[in-house]
Amino acid sequence: MCKWQTPSLQRTCTTVFPSQDPLDRADFNAVEYINTLFPTEQSLANIDEVVNKIRLKIRRLDDNIRTVVRGQTNVGQDGRQALEEAQKAIQQLFGKIKDIKDKAEKSEQMVKDITRDIKQLDHAKRHLTTSITTLNHLHMLAGGVDSLEAMTRRRQYGEVANLLQGVVNVLEHFNKYMGIPQIRQLSERVKAAQNELGQQILADFEEAFPSQGTKVAWLDKIDRRYAWIKRQLVDYEEKYGRMFPQEWCMTERIAVEFCHVTRTELSKIMRTRAKEIEVKLLLFAIQRTTNFEGLLAKRFSGCTLGDGTVKKPEVPPPSTNPFLEDEAGTETDEIVIEKSDAEKPKKPKAPDNPFHGIVSKCFEPHLYVYIESQDKNLSELIDRFVADFKAQGPPKPNVDEGGAVLPSCADLFVYYKKCMVQCSQLSTGEPMIALTTIFQKYLREYAWKILSGNLPKTTSSSSGLTITSLLKEKEGSEVAKFTLEELCLICSILSTAEYCLATTQQVSFPLQHLSDGAQQQSLFCHEMLCCSL
């Protein structure tokens, strides 16, 4: 192997010029090659032929080498030419690359320009969409404000309720644009419309429910108050009833507020014109008021009173008071007290009106007018009883009714009954106690003027007989002698006194349950019993 023929060169040559010729192998061995050509002695006979082939091959190799060597004489010139051509090609390549680079830069700039325009268009589209939406909102806001003002002037509250909410919602989109004068002006118009709408609605309510004038303020025209509120409630339910939820009970609240205002105003005007109050006028006003309270109880449940619950009044204990029984007769009916009836307890009806007293309570401080009237009426009644007794004279002995109860006594208790029933409907407080005092006074006068005052006189007592002296017998005392007429009169007076005692007992103790001040009332009832003895 030659020195210059390194293993790496040999491998490269083998790779570039692959050959199966043993002569081209790197580990060529001439002895092995000759043995291959002449493996046996007999093969030596062809040695000349083999030598000729080798020589021919050598000659061809020499020709090839010579051709190659000769060709290498022009390699330098061809190399320079090729180098020049390569340089020209490289220059052309660089020129083309530069052109491509310039075109690429232009394309990049063009792309940037195109994308920049597209980006601007995208921003423009977004801004345009926002502008269109804002413009639509502005149009809706401007139109809504105009419609809102127009509907407010026409008092179309049903349409305004829906429109106002929509306008307020649209206005919220312009909160960040309040620096713009036109937007700020629209916002101020909306606020002004809201204020005007609130004031207008209040004014309409005040117009629909105006305060009562002085012409219908006095008691003689009190029924006009109640007729007015009835009309107003009907009108309210037709016009405004559907604007509020049913569970708010707006109609009942208006009626209750009317009652409170009416009670306050009536209290004021009655204090101012107390001297003008007459009993007939007072009873007329109370009757109309209680009728109105009964009408409210039929129409409403009373759920808006107090804490919103209707409290059922407690049922009073059983009573044996005959004066609590319903009257079925006329004012001239007489009371007949029987033991069997007295033993049957009667339960007074429990009031089921939650509106009882909501207005009529204001009349209670002025019931002294009623008490004074009853005082006057009882005084006249006692005087009439005295006059009738003098005119008719004592009971006749030949009459079957001799010793019977005087009719005037029954008339007195009938009147007592009517007064008590009437007063219990008006009040069970101080007026009832005051009425009881009046009853005591005239029961005492009846005892003195009708009973004791008409007993016959005796010779032993210049001052005359008394009921107490008739009921007591003293040992050794002289027995008074009376005529038949006098005995009949005494029996009648004693029967009347006994009737008064029994009736007073039945009236006195149950009367305590009618009064709010039961302890104070029991003292008056005790005095009534003493008056009848």
Image: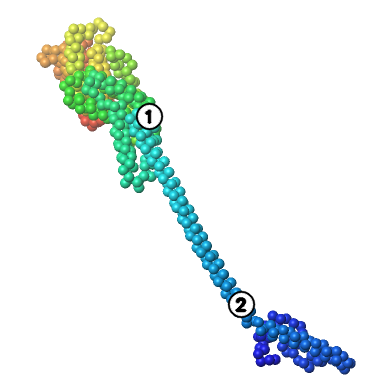
Of residue 385 and residue 208, the one placed in the foreground of this image is: 208
Residue 150 placement: quadrant: top left
What scheme was used to colour the molecule?
A: rainbow
Say which of 233 and 290 sits in front.
233
What amino acid is at disc 2? Gln
Residue at figure coordinates x 67%, y 87% from the top left = 7
Disc number at residue 190? none
Question: Where, quadrant-wise, is the N terminus in this rendering?
Answer: bottom right
| Alpha carbon distance from label 1 to label 2 | 114 Å
- Say above or below: 484 vs 432: above
Q: Is residue 468 visible?
A: no
In the image, residue 13 sits, relative to residue 226, either above or below, namely: below
First in sequence: mark 1 vs mark 2:
2
Looking at the picture, how far across and down is residue 489, in whole percent?
21, 11
Q: Position of residue 437 (x, y in %)?
A: 19, 24
Residue picked out by circle 1: 241
Quarter of the image that includes the C terminus: top left
Choose top left, top right, bottom left or bottom right for residue 412: top left
Name the quadrant containing residue 227: top left
Residue wearing tag 2? 81
Does residue 339 appear left or right of residue 135 in this picture? left
Q: Which residue is drawn at the image coordinates 21% and 14% (left, top)?
A: 493
Q: Residues within 10 Å of mark 1 (few under 14, many from 20)?
A: some
* Label 1 element class: helix
